[in-house]
C-alpha cells in the first residue's frame, strides 16, 4: 500500500520521532484509506469498527498554471495545427476535401420505343423498357444494316450477348455464309425477346404479347426483304400461333407491317446440334428464305 503522509506540514523524507504520538486526524485518514483499499480488494466486512475520517479535510492546493499555457482550464482544448495531408502518403490514403454532392438532373420524359422514328431511337428507348416481368436492366439489341436482304430472328437470349455462344454461334455463321451465301455483315440479326429470362421454364405468354409489338416495330424500321426465324418462340410470336416449329416451317407467312414482309420459320440451332440429321431439312428452309428475299 502506498505510504500515507500523516501531517501536511511534515517532510515525507524525515520519519517521525520514536515514541511520538500520532494525532487523531492522521489516524482517521489512514483508517479511511485502508478501508477504501480493502473495499477495492472485495473485503468489505472486516469485523473491526475503525474511526471515520473527519468531515473537514485539508484544502486542495490550487492548480498551478504554467505561464506557457495561459488558457489552461478544466475544459482546456489545445490549439491543434492545421491538417497536413502529406503524412497520409505513407498509408496510401488520399485526402479529399468534403464537397457538396452535385444534384441529380431531373429525369426526362419516358421514351416510347413504339414511337421511334429510327432504329437508334428505338434502341435508346428500349433500354428503359419495363413492359413485362422479364424486364432487365441489360437489353440485347439487334445489329446489322438497314434494308438488308434477310433479317434473322433468334430465340430469347441465354447470355448478355446477341450472337450465340459456342457451337451454336459457329453453326449460325455457317448457315449464313454457307447455306444463304451471304456475308454476316449483310444480315441483320436480333433476338425475339430483348431480356434474358432468369429461368428458361418460365411461361412466356405475357412476354410474347408485350414483345410482339416491339419486334414488329423493329422489323418495320429495319425493313428487310425477308425474315428467317429460328425456333418455337420466334415462330410463335411472329405468327401469333401456338403451333410448334415443325408445323410452322411448312409454309411462309406475311407479316402485317407497313411494308408486308415474308417470313420463313426453321428449326432452332440447339435442336440442329442435338440432332444433326435434321440439318438436311433446314437447307430446304434456307432455300425458301432465299427465294422470299429474291436472292434466287
Image: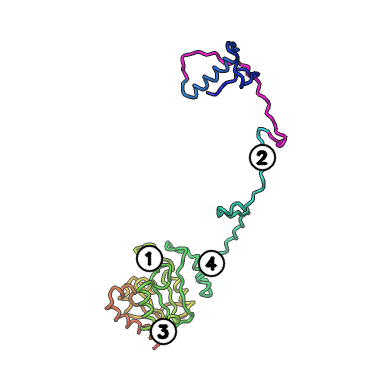
Measured in 3D between alpha carbons, the distance from the residue under mark 1 to the one under mark 2, in whole angstroms, is 73 Å
Q: Quadrant of residue 79?
A: top right
Where residue 258 sits in the image (x, y, percent)? 47, 78
Mark 1 or 2: in front is 2
The numbered mark, 3 or 2, whose residue comes first in the sequence reads: 2
Q: Which residue is mark 1?
A: 205
The numbered mark, 3 or 4, whose residue comes first in the sequence reads: 4
Mark 2 or 4: in front is 2
Q: Is residue 260 visible?
A: no
Residue, x 49% and y 22% (percent of image)?
39
Measured in 3D between alpha carbons, the distance from the residue under mark 3 to the one under mark 4, in whole angstroms, is 35 Å
Where residue 140 sits in the image (x, y, percent)? 45, 69
The numbered mark, 2 or 4, whose residue comes first in the sequence reads: 2
Q: Which mark is on residue 78? A: 2
Measured in 3D between alpha carbons, the distance from the residue under mark 3 to the one under mark 2, in whole angstroms, is 82 Å
Q: Which residue is mark 4?
A: 111
Horizontally, residue 4 falls left or right of residue 200, namely right
Q: Which residue is mark 3?
A: 182
Residue, x 43% and y 74% (percent of image)?
190
Mark 3 or 4: in front is 3
Q: Nearer the viewer, residue 200 or 109?
A: 200
Q: Quadrant of residue 185?
A: bottom left
Q: Secondary structure at mark 2?
A: loop
Residue, x 45% and y 63% (percent of image)?
136
Mark 3 or 2: in front is 2
Q: Nearer the viewer, residue 95 or 121?
A: 95
Measured in 3D between alpha carbons, the distance from the residue under mark 1 to the one under mark 4, in whole angstroms, is 25 Å
Q: Identify the magenta region.
A: 44-72
Measured in 3D between alpha carbons, the distance from the residue under mark 3 to the one under mark 1, in whole angstroms, is 34 Å
Secondary structure mostly seen in the magenta stretch: loop
Mark 3 or 1: in front is 3
Amino acid at each position: 500500500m502506498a505510504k500515507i503522509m500523516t501531517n501536511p506540514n511534515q517532510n515525507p523524507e524525515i520519519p517521525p520521532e520514536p515514541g511520538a504520538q500520532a494525532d487523531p486526524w492522521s489516524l482517521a485518514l489512514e483508517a479511511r484509506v485502508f478501508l477504501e483499499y480493502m473495499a477495492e480488494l472485495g473485503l468489505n466486512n472486516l469485523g473491526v469498527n475503525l474511526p471515520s475520517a473527519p468531515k473537514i479535510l485539508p484544502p486542495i492546493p490550487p492548480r498551478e498554471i504554467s505561464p506557457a499555457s495561459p488558457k489552461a482550464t478544466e475544459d482546456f482544448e489545445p490549439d491543434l495545427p492545421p491538417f497536413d495531408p502529406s503524412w497520409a502518403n505513407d498509408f496510401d490514403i488520399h485526402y479529399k476535401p468534403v464537397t457538396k454532392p452535385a444534384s441529380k438532373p431531373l429525369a426526362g420524359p419516358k421514351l416510347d420505343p413504339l414511337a421511334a422514328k429510327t432504329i437508334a431511337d428505338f434502341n435508346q428507348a428500349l433500354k428503359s423498357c419495363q413492359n413485362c416481368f422479364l424486364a432487365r436492366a441489360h437489353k440485347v439489341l439487334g445489329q446489322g444494316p438497314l434494308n438488308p436482304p434477310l433479317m434473322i430472328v433468334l430465340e430469347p437470349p441465354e447470355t448478355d450477348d446477341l450472337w450465340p455462344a459456342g457451337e451454336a454461334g459457329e453453326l449460325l455463321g455457317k448457315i449464313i455464309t454457307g447455306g444463304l451465301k451471304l456475308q454476316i455483315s449483310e444480315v441483320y440479326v436480333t433476338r425475339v425477346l430483348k431480356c434474358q429470362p432468369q429461368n428458361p421454364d418460365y411461361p412466356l405468354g405475357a412476354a410474347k404479347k408485350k414483345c410482339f409489338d416491339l419486334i414488329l416495330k423493329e422489323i418495320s424500321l429495319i425493313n428487310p426483304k425477308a425474315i428467317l426465324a429460328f425456333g418455337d418462340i420466334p415462330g410463335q410470336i411472329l405468327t401469333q400461333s401456338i403451333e410448334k416449329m415443325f408445323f410452322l416451317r411448312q409454309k411462309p407467312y406475311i407479316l402485317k407491317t407497313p411494308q408486308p414482309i415474308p417470313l420463313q420459320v426453321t428449326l432452332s440451332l440447339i435442336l440442329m446440334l442435338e440432332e444433326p440429321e435434321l440439318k438436311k431439312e433446314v437447307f430446304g428452309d434456307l432455300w425458301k428464305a432465299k427465294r422470299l428475299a429474291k436472292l434466287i
